[in-house]
Amino acid sequence: GVCGDLQNKKILITAGPTREPIDPVRFISNRSSGKMGYALAEAAVERGGEVILISGPTCLPQPSGLYKYIRVNTALEMRECVLEYFPWSDVVIKAAAVSDFRPKNYSEYKIKKKDSATAMTLELEKNPDILKELGEKKQKQLLVGFAAETDEIKENAMEKLNKKNLDLIVVNDVTAEGAGFEVDTNIVRIYYKDGSGEEIPKMTKKELAHVILDRVVKLLKN
Ligand code: PMT
Protein backbone atom coordinates (compact mmCIF):
# COMPACT_ATOMS: atom_id res chain seq x y z
CA GLY A 1 0.00 0.00 0.00
CA VAL A 2 3.03 2.28 0.21
CA CYS A 3 3.83 1.88 -3.47
CA GLY A 4 5.43 4.89 -5.09
CA ASP A 5 5.62 7.31 -2.16
CA LEU A 6 9.36 7.76 -2.72
CA GLN A 7 8.97 8.41 -6.45
CA ASN A 8 11.35 11.16 -7.65
CA LYS A 9 13.25 10.97 -4.36
CA LYS A 10 16.98 10.35 -4.39
CA ILE A 11 18.05 8.16 -1.49
CA LEU A 12 21.64 7.47 -0.47
CA ILE A 13 22.08 4.50 1.87
CA THR A 14 25.23 3.13 3.47
CA ALA A 15 25.46 -0.43 4.78
CA GLY A 16 27.85 -2.89 6.31
CA PRO A 17 31.12 -2.55 8.17
CA THR A 18 34.33 -0.91 7.07
CA ARG A 19 37.66 -2.72 7.01
CA GLU A 20 40.77 -0.94 8.19
CA PRO A 21 43.86 -2.78 6.94
CA ILE A 22 46.79 -3.61 9.21
CA ASP A 23 48.83 -5.51 6.63
CA PRO A 24 48.00 -7.48 3.44
CA VAL A 25 46.22 -10.23 5.40
CA ARG A 26 44.75 -8.48 8.46
CA PHE A 27 42.24 -5.77 9.23
CA ILE A 28 40.11 -4.21 11.97
CA SER A 29 36.37 -4.43 11.43
CA ASN A 30 33.10 -5.07 13.27
CA ARG A 31 30.12 -7.41 13.27
CA SER A 32 27.88 -5.53 10.81
CA SER A 33 26.50 -7.91 8.16
CA GLY A 34 24.91 -5.18 6.03
CA LYS A 35 21.41 -6.67 6.48
CA MET A 36 19.84 -3.50 7.91
CA GLY A 37 21.20 -1.23 5.18
CA TYR A 38 20.38 -3.66 2.35
CA ALA A 39 16.81 -4.03 3.70
CA LEU A 40 16.48 -0.24 3.59
CA ALA A 41 17.78 -0.13 0.02
CA GLU A 42 15.34 -2.83 -1.10
CA ALA A 43 12.41 -1.15 0.64
CA ALA A 44 13.29 2.25 -0.85
CA VAL A 45 13.43 0.72 -4.35
CA GLU A 46 10.01 -0.94 -3.78
CA ARG A 47 8.58 2.48 -2.94
CA GLY A 48 9.83 4.01 -6.17
CA GLY A 49 12.95 5.76 -4.89
CA GLU A 50 16.12 6.28 -6.90
CA VAL A 51 18.61 4.51 -4.65
CA ILE A 52 22.39 4.54 -4.35
CA LEU A 53 23.71 1.85 -2.01
CA ILE A 54 27.26 2.31 -0.75
CA SER A 55 28.32 -0.91 0.88
CA GLY A 56 31.23 -2.06 2.96
CA PRO A 57 32.33 -5.71 2.62
CA THR A 58 29.34 -8.03 3.07
CA CYS A 59 28.25 -11.46 1.79
CA LEU A 60 24.85 -10.18 0.65
CA PRO A 61 23.72 -10.23 -2.98
CA GLN A 62 23.31 -6.91 -4.76
CA PRO A 63 19.69 -5.73 -4.44
CA SER A 64 17.94 -5.29 -7.78
CA GLY A 65 16.63 -2.02 -9.12
CA LEU A 66 19.33 0.22 -7.66
CA TYR A 67 20.41 3.38 -9.46
CA LYS A 68 23.98 2.71 -8.32
CA TYR A 69 25.74 0.08 -6.21
CA ILE A 70 29.19 0.94 -4.94
CA ARG A 71 31.43 -1.31 -2.85
CA VAL A 72 34.06 0.22 -0.59
CA ASN A 73 36.46 -1.12 2.02
CA THR A 74 37.73 1.56 4.37
CA ALA A 75 36.05 4.44 6.20
CA LEU A 76 38.09 6.87 4.10
CA GLU A 77 36.78 5.27 0.87
CA MET A 78 33.24 5.36 2.21
CA ARG A 79 33.64 9.05 3.11
CA GLU A 80 34.89 9.96 -0.36
CA CYS A 81 32.03 8.12 -2.01
CA VAL A 82 29.33 9.51 0.30
CA LEU A 83 30.60 13.08 -0.15
CA GLU A 84 30.55 12.66 -3.94
CA TYR A 85 26.85 11.73 -3.98
CA PHE A 86 25.68 13.90 -1.09
CA PRO A 87 24.72 16.91 -3.30
CA TRP A 88 22.66 14.50 -5.46
CA SER A 89 20.63 13.12 -2.56
CA ASP A 90 17.35 14.16 -0.94
CA VAL A 91 17.65 11.62 1.87
CA VAL A 92 20.73 10.00 3.42
CA ILE A 93 20.41 6.96 5.66
CA LYS A 94 23.62 5.86 7.36
CA ALA A 95 23.12 2.29 8.51
CA ALA A 96 26.81 1.44 8.05
CA ALA A 97 28.96 0.68 11.07
CA VAL A 98 32.00 2.82 10.32
CA SER A 99 35.24 2.10 12.17
CA ASP A 100 36.01 5.00 14.46
CA PHE A 101 39.76 4.26 14.24
CA ARG A 102 42.21 2.84 11.70
CA PRO A 103 45.75 1.52 12.11
CA LYS A 104 48.11 4.49 11.93
CA ASN A 105 50.66 2.63 9.81
CA TYR A 106 49.86 0.11 7.11
CA SER A 107 52.54 -2.55 6.72
CA GLU A 108 53.21 -3.52 3.07
CA TYR A 109 54.49 -6.85 4.36
CA LYS A 110 52.76 -9.35 6.58
CA ILE A 111 53.74 -8.49 10.14
CA LYS A 112 55.85 -11.34 11.45
CA LYS A 113 55.45 -12.96 14.80
CA LYS A 114 58.59 -12.52 16.84
CA ASP A 115 59.11 -15.66 18.92
CA SER A 116 60.50 -13.62 21.80
CA ALA A 117 57.54 -11.22 21.94
CA THR A 118 54.57 -11.89 24.24
CA ALA A 119 52.67 -8.74 23.28
CA MET A 120 52.48 -6.16 20.54
CA THR A 121 51.01 -2.69 20.31
CA LEU A 122 49.02 -1.43 17.35
CA GLU A 123 48.76 2.33 17.08
CA LEU A 124 45.39 3.66 15.87
CA GLU A 125 44.30 7.02 14.56
CA LYS A 126 40.86 8.50 14.33
CA ASN A 127 38.74 8.19 11.21
CA PRO A 128 36.62 11.16 10.13
CA ASP A 129 33.00 11.11 11.30
CA ILE A 130 31.22 10.99 7.95
CA LEU A 131 27.76 11.69 9.29
CA LYS A 132 28.94 14.70 11.29
CA GLU A 133 30.46 16.15 8.13
CA LEU A 134 27.16 15.66 6.29
CA GLY A 135 25.38 17.40 9.16
CA GLU A 136 27.63 20.42 8.69
CA LYS A 137 27.19 20.48 4.88
CA LYS A 138 23.49 19.71 4.84
CA GLN A 139 21.12 21.88 2.77
CA LYS A 140 17.96 20.22 1.47
CA GLN A 141 18.88 16.75 2.68
CA LEU A 142 17.02 14.77 5.29
CA LEU A 143 19.61 12.99 7.43
CA VAL A 144 18.92 9.69 9.15
CA GLY A 145 21.52 8.23 11.49
CA PHE A 146 21.76 4.92 13.27
CA ALA A 147 23.30 4.28 16.64
CA ALA A 148 24.39 1.07 18.26
CA GLU A 149 24.16 1.57 22.01
CA THR A 150 24.51 -0.61 25.07
CA ASP A 151 23.54 1.84 27.85
CA GLU A 152 22.08 5.30 28.52
CA ILE A 153 20.35 4.85 25.22
CA LYS A 154 18.24 8.00 25.01
CA GLU A 155 21.03 10.31 26.26
CA ASN A 156 23.61 8.89 23.84
CA ALA A 157 21.17 8.92 20.93
CA MET A 158 20.02 12.52 21.47
CA GLU A 159 23.63 13.62 21.82
CA LYS A 160 24.46 12.03 18.44
CA LEU A 161 21.33 13.47 16.82
CA ASN A 162 22.23 16.99 17.98
CA LYS A 163 25.98 16.80 17.38
CA LYS A 164 25.51 15.43 13.84
CA ASN A 165 22.53 17.68 12.97
CA LEU A 166 20.26 14.71 12.14
CA ASP A 167 16.52 14.73 11.47
CA LEU A 168 16.01 11.37 13.10
CA ILE A 169 18.07 8.65 14.68
CA VAL A 170 17.36 4.94 14.87
CA VAL A 171 18.85 3.33 17.93
CA ASN A 172 19.37 -0.36 18.46
CA ASP A 173 20.07 -1.73 21.89
CA VAL A 174 22.75 -4.12 20.68
CA THR A 175 22.61 -6.12 23.91
CA ALA A 176 18.99 -7.20 23.32
CA GLU A 177 18.41 -10.58 21.74
CA GLY A 178 17.07 -10.31 18.18
CA ALA A 179 18.43 -6.78 17.80
CA GLY A 180 21.41 -5.13 16.13
CA PHE A 181 24.25 -6.90 14.37
CA GLU A 182 23.94 -9.98 12.12
CA VAL A 183 20.40 -11.13 12.97
CA ASP A 184 17.40 -10.82 10.62
CA THR A 185 15.31 -8.87 13.14
CA ASN A 186 15.78 -5.63 15.01
CA ILE A 187 14.34 -3.81 18.02
CA VAL A 188 14.81 -0.05 17.94
CA ARG A 189 13.74 3.30 19.23
CA ILE A 190 13.44 6.26 16.90
CA TYR A 191 14.16 9.76 18.23
CA TYR A 192 13.36 13.08 16.61
CA LYS A 193 14.84 16.59 16.84
CA ASP A 194 12.21 17.77 19.34
CA GLY A 195 13.29 15.05 21.76
CA SER A 196 10.22 12.89 21.19
CA GLY A 197 10.71 9.20 20.59
CA GLU A 198 8.89 5.98 19.81
CA GLU A 199 9.57 2.37 20.57
CA ILE A 200 9.38 -0.02 17.63
CA PRO A 201 8.77 -3.63 18.66
CA LYS A 202 10.77 -6.58 17.34
CA MET A 203 10.24 -7.14 13.62
CA THR A 204 12.26 -8.19 10.58
CA LYS A 205 14.81 -5.72 9.25
CA LYS A 206 12.75 -5.47 6.06
CA GLU A 207 9.60 -4.55 8.02
CA LEU A 208 11.58 -2.06 10.08
CA ALA A 209 13.01 -0.56 6.89
CA HIS A 210 9.46 0.25 5.79
CA VAL A 211 8.62 1.77 9.20
CA ILE A 212 11.70 4.03 8.96
CA LEU A 213 10.76 5.03 5.39
CA ASP A 214 7.19 5.80 6.56
CA ARG A 215 8.70 8.31 9.00
CA VAL A 216 11.00 9.71 6.29
CA VAL A 217 8.06 10.22 3.91
CA LYS A 218 6.13 12.02 6.65
CA LEU A 219 9.06 14.35 7.39
CA LEU A 220 9.57 15.04 3.66
CA LYS A 221 5.95 16.24 3.42
CA ASN A 222 6.44 18.87 6.15
O1 PMT B 1 24.56 -4.67 9.38
P1 PMT B 1 23.69 -5.45 10.37
O2 PMT B 1 24.34 -6.74 10.79
O3 PMT B 1 22.29 -5.62 9.84
O4 PMT B 1 23.58 -4.58 11.72
C1 PMT B 1 22.89 -3.36 11.71
C2 PMT B 1 23.64 -2.29 12.52
C3 PMT B 1 23.61 -2.65 13.99
C4 PMT B 1 25.07 -2.14 12.06
C5 PMT B 1 22.87 -0.95 12.24
O5 PMT B 1 21.53 -1.09 12.62
C6 PMT B 1 23.51 0.23 12.99
O6 PMT B 1 23.17 0.51 14.12
N1 PMT B 1 24.44 0.97 12.32
C7 PMT B 1 25.19 2.05 12.94
C8 PMT B 1 26.19 1.47 13.90
C9 PMT B 1 27.15 2.52 14.35
O7 PMT B 1 28.21 2.64 13.82
O8 PMT B 1 26.72 3.35 15.29
P2 PMT B 1 27.61 4.54 15.90
O9 PMT B 1 26.87 4.92 17.13
O10 PMT B 1 29.05 4.16 16.03
O11 PMT B 1 27.52 5.72 14.81
C10 PMT B 1 26.44 6.60 14.74
C11 PMT B 1 26.18 7.04 13.31
O12 PMT B 1 27.30 7.78 12.79
C12 PMT B 1 25.91 5.91 12.33
O13 PMT B 1 24.87 6.32 11.49
C13 PMT B 1 27.23 5.78 11.59
O14 PMT B 1 27.02 5.33 10.25
C14 PMT B 1 27.78 7.19 11.61
N2 PMT B 1 29.27 7.26 11.64
C15 PMT B 1 29.96 6.76 12.70
C16 PMT B 1 31.33 6.88 12.76
C17 PMT B 1 32.00 7.50 11.67
N3 PMT B 1 33.34 7.62 11.69
N4 PMT B 1 31.30 7.97 10.63
C18 PMT B 1 29.95 7.87 10.59
O15 PMT B 1 29.30 8.32 9.65
Image (spheres, rainbow, N blue to C red):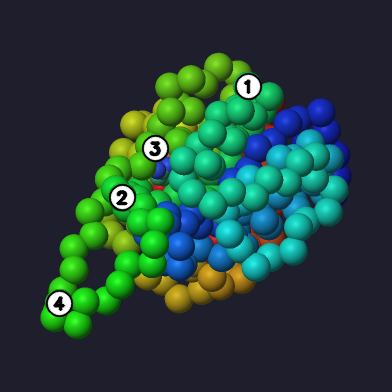
Q: Is any atom of residue 192 visible in this view?
A: no
Distance from disc 2 to disc 4, alpha carbons, whole Å, reads 20 Å
Q: Residue furthest top?
A: 139
Q: Which residue is mark 1?
A: 87
- Give the residue type that dot 1 points to: Pro
Q: Which residue is mark 2?
A: 105
* Residue depicted at x 39% and y 62%: 109
Distance from disc 3 to disc 2, alpha carbons, whole Å, reads 20 Å
> Is label 1's Cβ within 8 Å of ligand 1?
no
Residue 33, image quadrant = bottom right
Distance from disc 1 to disc 2, alpha carbons, whole Å, reads 32 Å
- Provide the secondary structure element on which disc 1 rests: loop
Residue 172, image quadrant = bottom left
Q: Are marks 3 and 1 in contact (CB under 8 Å)?
A: no
Task: Say which quadrant the C terminus sits in.
Answer: top right
- Provide the secondary structure element on which disc 4 rests: loop
* Residue depicted at x 59% and y 49%: 72
Q: Are marks 3 and 4 in contact (CB under 8 Å)?
A: no
Question: Between 180 and 21, which is closer to the camera in this rendering?
Answer: 21
Q: Which residue is mark 4?
A: 117
Residue 202 in percent (x, y) is at 55, 67
Q: Tag on residue 129?
A: 3
Residue 121 in percent (x, y) is at 18, 63
Question: Between 104 and 11, which is closer to the camera in this rendering?
Answer: 104
Depth check, mark 3 against mark 2: the one in front is 2
Residue 221 in percent (x, y) is at 69, 26
Q: Is any atom of residue 179 visible in this view?
A: yes
Q: Are marks 1 and 2 in contact (CB under 8 Å)?
A: no
- Provide the secondary structure element on which disc 3 rests: loop
> Is label 3's Cβ within 8 Å of ligand 1?
yes
